[in-house]
Image (tube, rainbow, N blue to C red):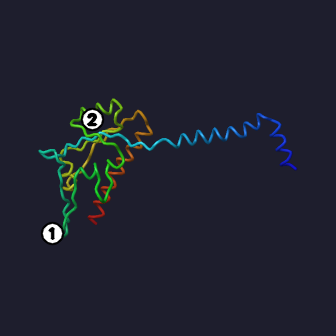
Amino acid sequence: TLLRKDTKVILRSRLLLATLVIYPLLIVGIIGFAFSQPNTRIPIAILNNDVDEQGNPIRGVIQDPINHDAAGIEVSTSQLINGDSTVFGLADYADLVTVRDEDQGRELLLSGQVQAFIIFPKGFVNSLIGFSESATIRVIVDRSDAVRANVTEIMVRGVVQQLQERYVEQKV
């Protein structure tokens, strides 16, 4: 009897009927639109200063400290940039733009064409395989959009950490 009474009240009041039908549809539409944005890749500028005279990325090998005859772990900036069969690289998550100098990368960043600018310094691979100093890269992120800046930082850190874990795993 209560259900019958409530149904009569709803059917008599057009405003209540419209509210009960239209509001949920509006909310579903708004939430659906908010979460249905295409998964866009982050545009990132890359400057690789760790190259030889021909412009090829320098390659190094981390030697096994116990068994010097064993094959070492090959290391290069191209692993971080492009990835390989064992780890993902930046190219798997972002649209990369290679720049020839730091000024061009900063210009792309300031114009909003890229969200981040990553600089691999000269001697990066030698620092990585030498164990005498820390191998560092510079990451400059566009902070105009805080959410995209955080996503970009997390993505870059994740790729570097994944490669670092692979080196440690192979070493151990």
Instruction: Tell which residue pokes out farthest to the right in this image.
Output: 1
59 up-or-down from 38: above or below:
below
Q: Write the residue at 36% across / 37% down.
A: 115
Location of mark 2 (residue): 105
Q: Write the residue at 77% across / 37% down.
A: 16
Q: Quadrant of the C terminus?
A: bottom left
Image position of 64 (left or right of 41): left
Q: Quadrant of residue 147?
A: top left
* Callout 2 secondary element: helix
Q: Write the residue at 29% across / 30% down.
A: 107
Instruction: Tell which residue pokes out farthest to the left in this image.
Output: 53
Percent x, y of residue 33: 55, 40
Location of mark 1 (residue): 69
Q: Say what amino acid the circle numbered 1 marks.
A: Asp
Q: Write the residue at 35% across / 49% down.
A: 157
Q: Residues within 10 Å of mark 2 (few under 14, many from 20)?
A: many
Q: Nearer the viewer, residue 5 or 65?
A: 5
Q: Nearer the viewer, residue 12 or 115?
A: 12
Marks 1,2: beta carbons within 8 A: no
**Which numbered marker is on residue 91?**
none
Percent x, y of residue 146: 43, 37
* Callout 1 secondary element: loop
Q: Say what amino acid the circle numbered 2 marks.
A: Gly
